[in-house]
């Protein structure tokens, strides 16, 4: 046996042995080319749910402007909003339920828009990595695998496996490499176009006929009304009891530590002014955004509102806020602000609060990955 043939046989043997450690209850053929010898998690924590490429990825998708967008979408359905250098795009979370990943560009930046419906986790990342001094632009897709009920992504270059909620490679050539978070907010379609009248929203004409016929519908009907996530993907005994499993939370990070705020706590107050280590933050709540994890027909789903998180320092001044009739007013200048952190009236008119990097999740999912997180209490 020549050396090349021997190495091929050895690689096949090692891969087969390693892949057998991954949970595979449906006995789906292992067609991934991931280097399973490089890993930072136990392979038994990963579960194969679907064959590779089961979710059609949105690669450089098409967008429509305000007039068409307001006809195409329900005004109160949620979108992930990203702004780069004054250019804004909105990505319907309902559409992303069918695709989970969009590889896109905005303002010259290569972005990765991700949504895992099982964790209600919507996060945007930078697709550009610096590897050995060189910049590498990656494209991603859903791998068909889960860990802690959260989507495991793969990059098409090396088929390394990445944890969506963490933005970190957990298996493969890029093991332990981290993606940079791009600040984003989740608000309603109506709020998006109110703030960004020249903004663009992801078109429903994605070119995937089977998926297009299901936009506007939720394949996980009544999921966020459950007391625990699906048992087949996350054991109920592992749910952190500090918060209800399906409570929505937002997280912030400071020097490697995390703090989470439940939607219910922000809803109760309308505004939360807080300091976490060196971060001076403010959280806004406003009704008018529906859940896409509620009714099968999302137009009939209940209103859960939006929570946005911002750095509360403007021009070196730490602002504190109160809420009056869906308007956010800072106590220092009495200027008026909206849910997107934009000042539309007062001495600070046209100022924009900087988005504090954060993401939205169900509590069970976030706490499974970050059990050490501090939980906001009044």
Image (spheres, grey):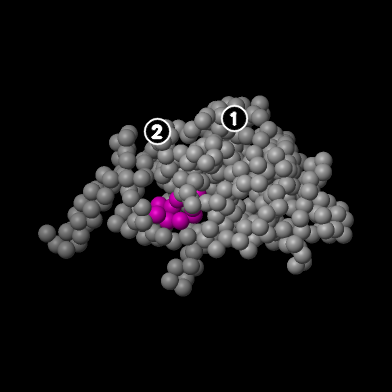
Choose between 12 and 218: the one closer to the eye. 218
Q: Position of residue 245 (x, y in %)?
A: 52, 37
Mark 1 or mark 2, earlier in chain: 2
User: Which quadrant of the figure contains the N terminus?
Assistant: bottom left
Q: Position of residue 318 (x, y in %)?
A: 75, 62
For residue 232, the mark is 2
Q: Residue furthest bottom?
A: 133
* Res. 56 visible in picture: no
Q: Is residue 314 left or right of residue 13?
A: right
Q: Is residue 87 left or right of residue 239?
A: right
Q: Residues within 10 Å of mark 1 (few under 14, many from 20)?
A: many
Q: Main secondary structure of the magenta part?
A: strand
At horizontal 36% and vertical 45% (from top left) the residue drawn is 45
Choose between 359 and 366: the one closer to the eye. 366
Q: Is residue 266 magenta?
A: no
Q: Which residues are magenta?
A: 161-171
For residue 266, the mark is none
Establish if 96 lies above or below 252: above
Element at label 1: loop
At horizontal 73% and vertical 43% (from top left) the residue drawn is 270
At horizontal 32% and vertical 58% (from top left) the residue drawn is 38
Alpha carbon separation for disc pair 1 and 2: 20 Å
When asked about the image quadrant of residue 144, the answer is top left
For residue 294, the mark is 1
At horizontal 43% and vertical 47% (from top left) the residue drawn is 152
Establish if 38 lies above or below 70: below
Q: Position of residue 165 (x, y in %)?
A: 50, 49
Element at label 2: loop
* Res. 272 visible in picture: yes
């Amino acid at each position: 046996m020549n050396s090349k043939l021997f190495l091929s046989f050895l690689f096949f043997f090692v891969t087969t042995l390693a892949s057998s450690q991954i949970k595979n209850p449906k006995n789906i053929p292992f067609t991934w080319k991931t280097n399973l010898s490089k890993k930072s998690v136990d392979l038994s924590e990963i579960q194969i749910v679907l064959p590779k490429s089961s979710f059609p990825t949105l690669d450089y998708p098409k967008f429509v402007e305000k007039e068409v967008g307001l006809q195409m979408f329900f005004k109160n359905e949620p979108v992930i909003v990203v702004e780069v250098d004054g250019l804004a795009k909105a990505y319907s979370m309902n559409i992303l339920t069918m695709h989970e990943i969009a590889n896109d560009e905005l303002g010259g930046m290569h972005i990765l828009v991700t949504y895992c419906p099982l964790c209600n986790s919507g996060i945007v990342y930078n697709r550009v990595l610096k590897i050995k001094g060189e910049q590498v632009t990656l494209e991603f897709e859903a791998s068909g695998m889960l860990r802690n009920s959260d989507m495991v992504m793969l990059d098409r270059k090396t088929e390394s496996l990445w944890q969506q909620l963490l933005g970190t490679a957990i298996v493969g050539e890029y093991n332990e490499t981290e993606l940079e978070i791009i600040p984003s907010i989740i608000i309603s379609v109506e709020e998006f176009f109110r703030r960004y009248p020249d903004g663009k929203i992801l078109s429903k004409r994605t070119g995937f006929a089977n998926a297009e016929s299901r936009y506007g519908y939720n394949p996980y009907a009544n999921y966020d009304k459950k007391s625990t996530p699906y048992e087949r993907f996350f054991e109920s005994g592992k749910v952190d009891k500090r918060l209800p499993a399906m409570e929505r939370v937002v997280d912030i990070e400071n020097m490697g530590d995390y703090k989470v705020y439940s939607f219910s706590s922000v809803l109760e107050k309308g505004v939360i002014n807080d300091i976490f280590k060196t971060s001076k933050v403010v959280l806004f709540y406003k009704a008018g955004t529906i859940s896409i994890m509620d009714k099968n027909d999302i137009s009939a789903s209940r209103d859960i509102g939006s929570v946005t998180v911002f750095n509360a320092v403007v021009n070196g001044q730490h602002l504190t806020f109160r809420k009056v009739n869906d308007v956010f007013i800072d106590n220092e200048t009495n200027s008026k602000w909206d849910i997107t952190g934009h000042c539309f009236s007062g001495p600070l008119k046209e100022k924009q609060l900087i988005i504090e990097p954060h993401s939205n999740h169900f509590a069970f999912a976030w706490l499974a990955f970050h059990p050490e997180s501090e939980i906001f209490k009044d």
